[in-house]
């Protein structure tokens, strides 16, 4: 007997322990199915109120006196991330700059800490900015960027990393969750393999922070970066965070010597003397409004709990894969994500994925398109319901049955 998928979705929503968190977000378009929270998370209601207060009172009235409360914001958010969503300790995470800038700072620091070694390892499906930054670091230092092959749909493997390691490798830098497929890398196994070869490891957590457990401490991870505007819902252009294992903090020196990384910044001293803590990886004035947005977003995710978030994200993805098998596989789609071991998105491959993505937008479903020919569907556990997955896939099925995607140009005239 065929499964009633709508009834199944409604039952799963009724049993969802995170269901109440949806009310914490601004959701004004009742008909919109939003499958792109892994690119830009929704606006939390608390953030809107907090930013209004910050603008009207702290900036508008307090003026420069507001720095009494702003000065420690980067570490406040970092400590909340460490204790609530990342397996780390207070004083190992801080907020500021962009992911690309933080990746650069930590990559240079790591390579400097391994003198005599001339190779950086990454994979060919790592996020473009990571590959570009690492390419630039290697070029500037006369090093070699060793790019190992990885499967677009199943991600980088421990075996592939092991094959790329030798005594010349200074740094291994990879993404924990693949941006295209959602495949989760073996963070602990890869970290251990790199350490056995004498290399340091730098992980990109952009698609894992706030979506999957990140065992930084137990895996002995050296360094990590991540953004706050995806699953942490801090808004467009929100600041990044970085992690440095405590035992490494005093020995690493990052390349951008700014006054917020100075041990006594307000002494305005003549020479740079880096702070003995994670603060040495800061550069300039921290982003206050973005910091407040990050704080509100992290607080929401921490209250939900990363284990419950991961469990729901997995269940949403499993339900989506079931609908793909039943409704979409016969329409020329192929599953471009692992059936297990995923982050909070599922990717489908289709030769007309770009046109289909435009047809979905026309049907009030917001997906994401990624080359080559991939439709990426993100399920944010704090506000995506099972009925949303049902509705979005039902509209996609209708588009495929009617072939209405053919009305849209195959020319990618814009980036999504």
Image (cartoon, rainbow, N blue to C red):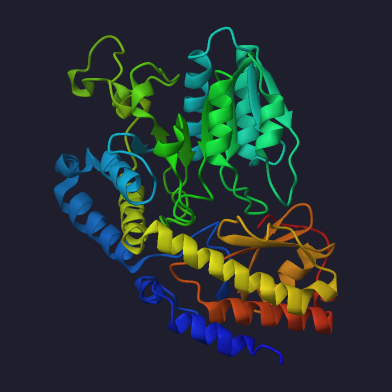
Rendered residue at 18%/56% (across/down) = 57
- Residue 283 visible in image: no
Rendered residue at 54%/30% (across/down) = 192
Residue 78, position in %: x, y?
A: 32, 42
Q: Is 382 drawn above or below residue 297 in the view shown?
A: below
Q: Nearer the viewer, residue 112 or 6?
A: 6
**Can you tell which quarter of the image residue 89 is in?**
top left
Location of the N terminus (image quadrant): bottom right
Q: Nearer the viewer, residue 42 or 268?
A: 42
Q: Is 305 drawn above or below residue 86 in the view shown?
A: below
Residue 260, position in %: x, y?
A: 30, 27
Q: Nearer the viewer, residue 316 or 287?
A: 316
Task: Left or right? Give the position of 115 relative to 291.
Answer: right
Q: Nearer the viewer, residue 219 or 352?
A: 219
Residue 404, position in %: x, y?
A: 81, 80
Location of the C terminus (image quadrant): bottom right
């Amino acid at each position: 007997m065929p499964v009633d998928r709508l009834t199944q979705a409604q039952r799963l929503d009724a049993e969802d322990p995170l269901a109440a968190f949806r009310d914490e977000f601004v959701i004004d378009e009742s008909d919109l199915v939003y499958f792109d929270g892994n690119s830009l998370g929704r606006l939390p209601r608390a953030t809107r109120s907090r930013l209004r207060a910050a603008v009207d009172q702290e900036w508008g009235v307090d003026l420069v006196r507001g720095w009494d409360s702003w000065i420690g914001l980067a570490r406040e958010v970092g400590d909340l991330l460490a204790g609530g969503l990342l397996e780390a300790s207070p004083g190992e995470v801080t907020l500021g700059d962009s992911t690309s800038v933080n990746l650069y700072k930590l990559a240079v620091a790591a390579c400097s800490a391994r003198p005599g070694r001339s190779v950086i390892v990454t994979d060919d499906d790592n996020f473009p900015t990571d590959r570009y930054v690492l390419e630039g670091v290697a070029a500037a230092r006369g090093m070699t960027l060793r790019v190992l092959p990885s499967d677009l749909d199943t991600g980088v493997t421990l075996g592939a990393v092991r094959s790329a390691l030798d005594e010349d490798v200074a740094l291994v830098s990879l993404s924990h969750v693949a941006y295209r497929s959602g495949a989760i890398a073996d963070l602990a196994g890869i970290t251990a393999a790199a350490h056995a070869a004498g290399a340091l490891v730098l992980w990109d957590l952009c698609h894992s922070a706030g979506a999957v457990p990140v065992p930084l401490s137990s895996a002995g991870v050296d360094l990590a970066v991540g953004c706050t505007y995806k699953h942490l819902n801090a808004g467009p252009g929100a600041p990044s965070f970085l992690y440095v294992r405590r035992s490494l903090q005093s020995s690493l020196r990052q390349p951008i010597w700014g006054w917020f990384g100075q041990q006594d910044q307000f002494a305005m001293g003549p020479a740079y003397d880096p702070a003995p803590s994670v603060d040495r990886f800061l550069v300039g004035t921290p982003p206050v409004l973005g910091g407040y947005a990050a704080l509100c977003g992290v607080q929401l995710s921490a209250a939900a709990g990363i284990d419950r978030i991961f469990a729901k994200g997995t269940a949403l993805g499993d339900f989506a894969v079931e609908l793909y098998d039943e409704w979409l596989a016969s329409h020329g789609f192929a599953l471009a994500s692992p059936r297990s071991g995923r982050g909070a998105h599922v990717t489908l491959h289709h030769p007309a994925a770009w046109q289909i993505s435009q047809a979905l937008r026309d049907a009030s479903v917001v997906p994401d398109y990624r080359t080559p020919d991939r439709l990426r569907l993100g399920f944010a556990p704090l506000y995506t319901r099972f009925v949303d997955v049902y509705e979005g896939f039902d509209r996609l099925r209708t588009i495929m049955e009617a072939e209405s995607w053919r009305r849209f140009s195959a020319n990618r005239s814009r980036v999504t």
